[in-house]
Image (spheres, coloured by chain):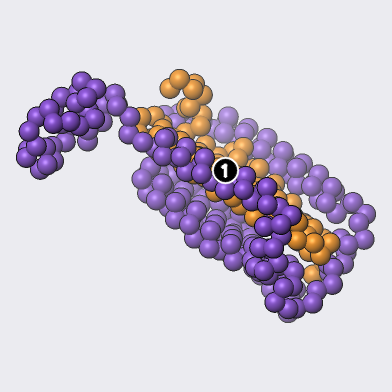
Amino acid sequence: MSSVLFFIAAIGAIAGAIGVISLRNPFYCVLALVVHLISLALLFLLLRSEFVAAVQVVVYAGAVMVLYVFVVAYVGGDGESIGQRLRGAGAGPSAAGLRTGGAILAVAVGVELMIALLGTGLAGIGGHGAGYAPGPHAYGTPAYIGKLLLTRFLLAFEVASFLLLIGAVGAVVLARRRGGLDDPDEGRLTPLDLLRPRETGTTAESIGRHGG
Amino acid sequence: MSIGWYLSVSAIVFSLGAFGVITRRNPLVILLCLELMLNGGNLALIAFARMWGNGDGQIMALIVMTVAACEVCIGLGLIVAIHRRRLPVDVDELRELQG
C-alpha cells in the first residue's frame, strides 16, 4: 500500500516539476507547482512528518501560491515576454544553445546528486528508517516539533521570525508607489479632494506637489 | 519504500528546478523553479530525518520554508516594482541595474 502511494506521489511530484519548467503560460506553471507541492506533502506524510506536510499544504500550496497567482494576474501572464517578441526568429540559435547547455548541466547535477546521496554507503539508505511508535508525542507530530522548536532550536526560531519581519517590510518598501513616477493614476481626483480646502495638509503638498 | 527512493526523487526534482532556472526567461517562472530546488532539498532533509529517527531535519525543512516564503515575498515585490516602471519582465532585458 505504501509503495503504491509512494509511486503515485513521486510521479505527481516529478510531473508537476516538469510542468513548471515546460509550460509557456506562467499561470499554468503556478498550477503545476501546486500539484507538485501537494504530491510532495503526500511524500512527507509517507515519511511520517505529519506537521511538515500540513505546513506544506497550508503555507506553500495555500498562501504562497495565492500570492503567485495574484502577481501573475497583475503582471500579466503572457506566455511570450517582450524580449522574445523583439528578438523574433533570431532567438532560435541562442535559445536552443541555452536549452542544450541547461539540459547537460541539469543531467550532470542530477547524476552527481544521485551518486552523492545514494553512494554514501550509509546502512540506512536501503532501510525503511528508524523505528516508529505511534503516540501523541511520537516523531513528527506537532507536539514533537513544537518542543524541538522551543527548546533546542529556539535561536533558529527567533531568527526566522526576524527574517519574516524583514521580508514583510522589504516587500512593502519595494512595491510602494514612489513619487516622481509618471503614473497616470497619480493625478486622479477623488470626491474627497473636491470637498477639502486647499493647503490643508496632505503629504504631497508638504513636499511641494500641489493639487491632487 | 526504502529511503533511497525518496532521495532519488529529491535529486530529480532539484535538477529539474536547476534546468528551469537556467533556461526560463520570465522572472516569475524562475522564482517557481527556485521553489522546486528548495523543495528538492526539503525532501532530502526529511528523508534523512526519517532515516535517523531524529527531528532536526524536519526543523531545518521548516526553516527552509520560512526562507522560501521571504524570498518569494521580496522576489514578487521586485517583479511588481519592475512592472510598475514599465520595464520588460524578462531577465535577458534586465542586465543593467540602473534601469
Residue at 39% from the left image edge and 50% from the top image edge: A70
Q: Nearer the viewer, residue A98 or A14?
A: A14
Point out residue A157 in the picture as x, y percentages from the top left corner. 64, 51
Q: Secondary structure at mark 1?
A: helix
Q: Nearer the viewer, residue A109 or A163?
A: A163
Residue at 71% from the left image edge and 52% from the top image edge: A153
Point out residue A15 in the picture as x, y percentages from the top left corner. 61, 59
| Residue at the disc numbered 1 | A163
The answer, for residue B90, to whether it is visible in the render is yes
Quadrant where the C terminus of chain A is found in the figure: top left
Q: Nearer the viewer, residue A115 or A99?
A: A115
Q: Which chain is rendered orange in the image?
A: B
Task: Write down the chain letter for disc 1.
Answer: A
Residue at 83% from the left image edge and 67% from the top image edge: A129
Residue type indicated by callout 1: Leu
Point out residue B5 in the picture as x, y percentages from the top left corner. 79, 62
| Colour representing chain A | purple
Toward the front, the furthest residue is A151
Could you tell whether A47 is left or right of B31 in the image?
A: right
Could you tell whether A132 is left or right of B85 in the image?
A: right
Quadrant where the N terminus of chain A is found in the figure: bottom right
The image quadrant of residue A122 is bottom right
